[in-house]
């Protein structure tokens, strides 16, 4: 018999949650967005170049993307471990995420890079990404930097999280760049 589990919703106490209210679904994309992200990942398999995620947190979306990618595709996920909703120190946050992504990193499917995203943008010399998923800092200026880099580097599919009233900067920038071609929940694709 399966053990009874409390519904996930009961744990969700928002971005102000401490470790006492910990749940890995906090601050990741809403579960109903996952099929859309996975469809974009499958589409990205038509292109060469890596899938780049900006903002790893715990690697929840990274893992969903890894399940949909081709075996040959690589995911680079970038995080500076400068924010989490549980009050973890940057080193503890990185250690936890490294553990979550251990198998995917050891098998070469995922590479986790600890770096400020804007530094990563400056340093990036790889091929045009097949897909970029933007989910780090959601104000106007940072979202604009993210989109300018993704377009400038020639990313084939550009998507991100939090196109919603809570993050007007994201909405404004995405609209300035032509608006979402597709929207599933708060996940957008140009
Ligand atoms: C909303 S969470 C990412 C959630 C993740 N994409 C998911 O769906 O599970 C945002 C993450 O962006 C990271 N972040 C914020 N600003 C950053 C920056 N300037 N450079 C790199 N990472 C940053 C934070 O440390 C945090 O882990």
Image: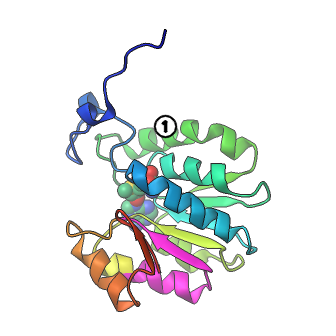
From this viewpoint, is residue 100 visible? Answer: yes
Which residue does the image show at 58% across and 62% down from the upper left? Answer: 39
Q: What stretch is highlighted in magenta?
A: 144-161
Q: In this view, does 190 lie to the left or right of 47?
A: left
Task: Give the left or right position of residue 182, taking residue 152 as reference.
Answer: left
Q: Answer with the quadrant where ligand 1 appears in the image.
A: bottom left
Is 68 left, or right, of 59 in this rendering?
Answer: right
- Which residue appears at 34% of the width and 40% of the height? 88
Where residue 187 appears, x then y in whole percent? 40, 65
* Pointer 1 residue: 96
Q: Residues within 10 Å of mark 1 (few under 14, many from 20)?
A: some
Q: Does the magenta stretch include residue 183?
A: no
Above or below, 180 against 81 in this view is below
Judging depth in this view, the residue of 118 and 71 nearest the camera is 71
Above or below 128: residue 17: above
Q: Residue lying furthest top in this view? A: 1
Residue closest to the far front = 1
Query: Which residue occupies 53% across, 81% down?
Result: 150
Can you name the residue that lies furthest to the right here? Answer: 72
Q: Which of 141 and 161 is in front in this view?
A: 161
| Rendered view: 173 above or below 131 | below
Indicate the position of residue 119 as horizontal and vertical percent values: 50, 73
Q: Can residue 81 be seen in this view?
A: no
Picture coordinates of residue 33, whole percent (x, y): 43, 57
Which secondary structure, mark 1?
Answer: helix
**Which of the 4 image quadrants contains residue 11?**
top left
Q: Which residue is drawn at 73% across and 75% down?
A: 47
Number of numbered discs visible in the structure rendering: 1
Whole-percent x, y for residue 116 in the image: 46, 65
Q: Is residue 150 inside the magenta stretch?
A: yes
22 left or right of 110? left
């Amino acid at each position: 018999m399966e053990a009874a589990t409390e519904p996930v919703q009961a744990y969700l106490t928002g971005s102000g949650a401490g470790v006492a209210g910990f749940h890995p679904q906090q601050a990741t994309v809403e579960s109903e967005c996952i099929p859309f992200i996975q469809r974009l990942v499958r589409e990205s398999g038509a292109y060469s170049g890596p899938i780049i995620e900006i903002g790893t947190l715990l690697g929840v979306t990274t893992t969903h993307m890894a399940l949909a990618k081709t075996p040959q595709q690589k995911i680079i996920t970038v995080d500076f471990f400068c924010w989490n909703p549980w009050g973890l120190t940057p080193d503890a946050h990185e250690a936890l995420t490294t553990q979550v992504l251990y198998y995917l990193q050891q098998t070469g499917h995922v590479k986790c890079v600890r770096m400020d995203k804007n530094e990563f943008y400056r340093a990036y010399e790889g091929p045009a990404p097949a897909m970029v998923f933007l989910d780090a800092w959601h104000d106007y200026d940072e979202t604009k930097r993210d989109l300018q880099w993704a377009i400038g580097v020639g990313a084939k599919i550009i998507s991100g999280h939090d196109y919603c009233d809570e993050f007007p900067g994201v909405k404004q920038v995405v609209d300035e760049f032509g608006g979402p071609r597709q929207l599933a929940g708060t996940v957008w694709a140009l």
